[in-house]
Image: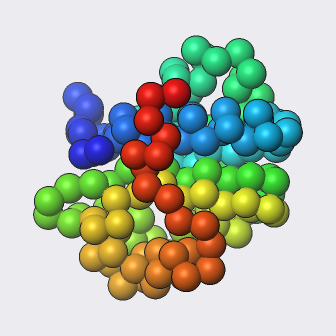
Amino acid sequence: MEEKKDEEESTLNEGEAEIAITHAKRLIQSGVHASDIRIITPYLTQVVLLRTLRTKEDKLKEVEISTADGFQGREKEAIIISMVRSNSKKEVGFLSDRRRMNVAVTCARRQCCIICDIETVSSDKFLKQLIEYFEENCEYSSGSRYGNE
């Protein structure tokens, strides 16, 4: 699930967007209200892609999608974070801003789902510690588990 650049050189990741939408659908199927779900990503182009995918599923219309900055200080039952970055240079871009990541992770009341390329993200010391915490204390799953739903 390699990242891509759009015409304006903003970053997006189609594979991560599909997993985020699939995870939101699974949450709704398990009884979580769509209005209690938020998808956060640091890249505006990823927000646009996620909103486009959301329009294909009527039950997702109340799922909030925005950048971490757009949700500062507001909590939701379930937070899905699409980190976007996946590249051979292991560049993390905006993800290195600890404040943004802290805001994103701490907005979750009951569930925080992080979707990322562990190899790329782990090149940053803070993010590596965050991923290690999730691996040790939370449920861990491969993106391939989501298949084509």
User: Is residue 73 in sight in this rendering?
Assistant: yes
Q: Nearer the viewer, residue 146 or 114?
A: 146
Residue name at image x 71 percent, y 15 percent: 58
Residue name at image x 24 percent, y 45 percent: 2
Residue name at image x 50 percent, y 59 percent: 141
Rendering coords of residue 116 (x, y %): 41, 57
Instruction: Tell me where residue 60 sits by quadrant.
Output: top right
Total residue callouts: 0
**Does residue 42 sit above or below 10 in this rendering?**
below
User: Residue farthest to the left?
Assistant: 89
Q: Nearer the viewer, residue 129 or 96?
A: 129
**Does residue 77 sit above or below 107 in this rendering?**
above
**Does residue 109 sit above or below 66 in this rendering?**
below
| Image quarter (top left, top right, bottom left or bottom right) of the N terminus | top left
Q: Is residue 109 left or right of residue 133?
A: right
**Does residue 100 sit above or below 51 in this rendering?**
below
User: Is residue 44 in sight in this rendering?
Assistant: no
Rendering coords of residue 84 (x, y %): 38, 50
Instruction: Tell me where residue 134 sits by quadrant.
Output: bottom right
Q: Is residue 52 left or right of residue 95?
A: right
Model colouring = rainbow
Q: Nearer the viewer, residue 93 or 36?
A: 36
Rendering coords of residue 28 (x, y %): 77, 35
Residue name at image x 24 percent, y 38 percent: 5
